Image: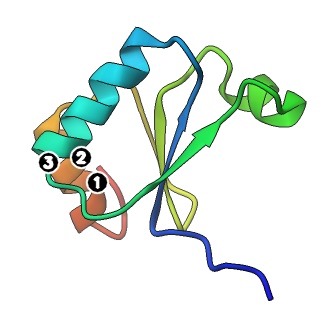
Amino acid sequence: MSQPTPALQLFQRDHCPLCDQALDVLAQARVPDFESVWIDDDEALEARYGIRVPVLRSADGRELDWPFDVAAVVAFIGSPSGP
């Protein structure tokens, strides 16, 4: 049985200072739960997100590209239609 997709996913890569900043913003926004998705070893994810990471994605497919701040994250997770 497969696990359900978490409400939020953060697409990121190893050794990414912007990704570290995004994690800090998510902590400040008190995002309750999210999955880190590493794109480094996945060609499809690398092609889609390579120059865009970090990207926050909701379970309904909406995406919030970097740069984002606490207010943008709060608006993104609080609104079903996105920012």
| Crowd around label 2: few <14 · some 14–19 · many ≥20 (10 Å) | many
- Dot 3 falls on a residue whose secondary structure is loop
Q: Are marks 3 and 2 in contact (CB under 8 Å)?
A: yes
Residue 24 place in picture, x, y as percent:
22, 31
Residue 12 can be seen in this image = yes
Image quadrant occupied by the N terminus = bottom right
In the rendered image of this protein, does residue 68 appear above or below residue 57?
above
Three-letter code, disc 1: Phe
* Residue depth check, mark 3 versus mark 2: number of the one nearer the observer: 3
- Dot 1 falls on a residue whose secondary structure is helix
Q: How is the image coloured?
A: rainbow
Residue 13's tag is none
* First in sequence: mark 3 vs mark 2: 3
Find the residue positioned furthest to the bottom: 1
In the rendered image of this protein, does residue 33 appear above or below residue 19?
below
Task: List the residue tagged with mark 1.
Answer: 76
Residue 53 place in picture, x, y as percent:
53, 24
Quarter occupied by residue 75? bottom left
| Number of numbered discs visible in the structure rendering | 3
Residue 29's tag is 3
**What is the distance, in whole Å, between disc 3 and disc 2 at their CAs?**
7 Å
- Dot 2 falls on a residue whose secondary structure is helix
Q: Are marks 1 and 2 in contact (CB under 8 Å)?
A: yes
Three-letter code, disc 3: Ala
Three-letter code, disc 2: Val
Q: Are marks 1 and 3 in contact (CB under 8 Å)?
A: no
* First in sequence: mark 1 vs mark 3: 3
Find the residue positioned furthest to the right: 43
Task: List the residue tagged with mark 2.
Answer: 73
Residue 44 place in picture, x, y as percent:
86, 35
